[in-house]
Image (cartoon, grey):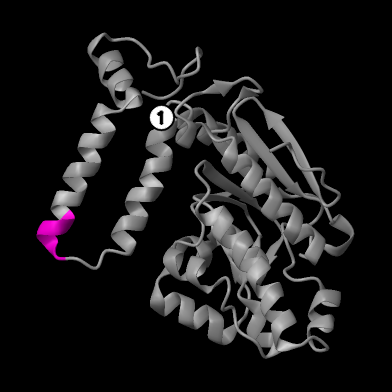
Amino acid sequence: MSQPVCQHLHLEVEDAVLKVGLSRESVYNALNTEMITELCEVLEWSASRSAGPAGTLVDADGPLFRLLVLHGMGKHFCAGADINMMRDAGAKTPEENREDSARLDRLFNGLWSHPCYTIAVLHGVALGGGAGLISACDHIVAVEGARVALSEGKLGILPAVIGPYVYRRVGSAAFRRLAMHAGRIGTEEAQRIGLIEEVCKDADEAWATVNGLVAEVLTTGPSAVSSAKELTLGFDRWTGDDPALRTWTLDFTSRMRGSSEGQEGLSAFLEKRPPAWRPDDGGSK
């Protein structure tokens, strides 16, 4: 699968890091059908070239991805759904509207389940679908003054498609409150409820924080990063009893310890050397 050609996204490949910039600046990076489709294609392409599932750091085409950084270009991160797309929805059949919703679901689930460590850089506003994008990432770094809203209620609709991802981040009570009042919250409140991880005074500090995160994650085994998502999903969906859960975690641990990455990590620790996946200039220990 070759790198997608994008009109509404700006892609930067820096070795094992893929930066995806939303680039419809004139409409505050509002999500239209074309941008959503491009995001889906980029997520599927980068997932297919992720180091974790592949069990290797490089292939014939070069380094495989270990981190994905999502950011907005221009004044805002993402102002939600494009107004023209919203207006057109009123003239569509239920089947056509369901197809549009399925495309959005493909986007948010593709980001949520992406095998790389995903970071969102939030500035300006993240409204509606923009809030869904940050909620589906693993780590959100926000610039002071940013605003987030599940704004769908202002239009008489609901944040249903993005709902599972916001709900998993903030929990039942906070999700219900945000969906009902549909107003904007600042970075202090967003951090308090767990919607974002870090707040920085400006964009320069935010990107310095992202660079620190990248350096830290590159010291972690790429398969361990991907498998941590698999482990979490197993906990989220567990319907068996407690003894069965304990058995499942034992099997999971045994599989990881016996893997080539697990053996390399344990050997490197005992031999007091960096593991093969760690950059030469290292990072935190």
Q: Nearer the viewer, residue 259 or 284?
A: 259
Q: Position of residue 130 (x, y in %)?
A: 66, 64
Q: Position of residue 98 (x, y in %)?
A: 67, 79
Residue at coordinates 89% horizontally, 59% vertically from top-left?
26
- Tally of marks: 1
Residue at coordinates 69% horizontally, 46% vertically from top-left?
42
Q: Nearer the viewer, residue 106 or 191?
A: 106
The answer to whether any part of residue 209 appears in the image is no
**Position of 74 relative to 277 (above/below):** below
Residue at coordinates 63% horizontally, 60% vertically from top-left?
107
**Position of 267 relative to 29 (above/below):** above
Q: How many residues crowd around disc 1 within 10 Å: few (fewer than 14), some, or many (20 or more)?
A: some
Residue 94 horizontal side relative to residue 232, left or right: right
Q: Nearer the viewer, residue 25 or 160?
A: 160
Look at mark 1 in the image and give the residue it sits on: 220
Q: Secondary structure at mark 1?
A: loop
- Residue range of the region highlighted in magenta in the rendering: 241-245
Which three-letter amino acid code belongs to the residue tagged 1? Answer: Thr
* Quadrant position of the N terminus in the picture: top right
Q: Position of residue 245 (x, y in %)?
A: 18, 56
Magenta-drawn stretch, dominant element (helix, strand or loop)? helix
Q: Nearer the viewer, residue 113 or 69?
A: 113
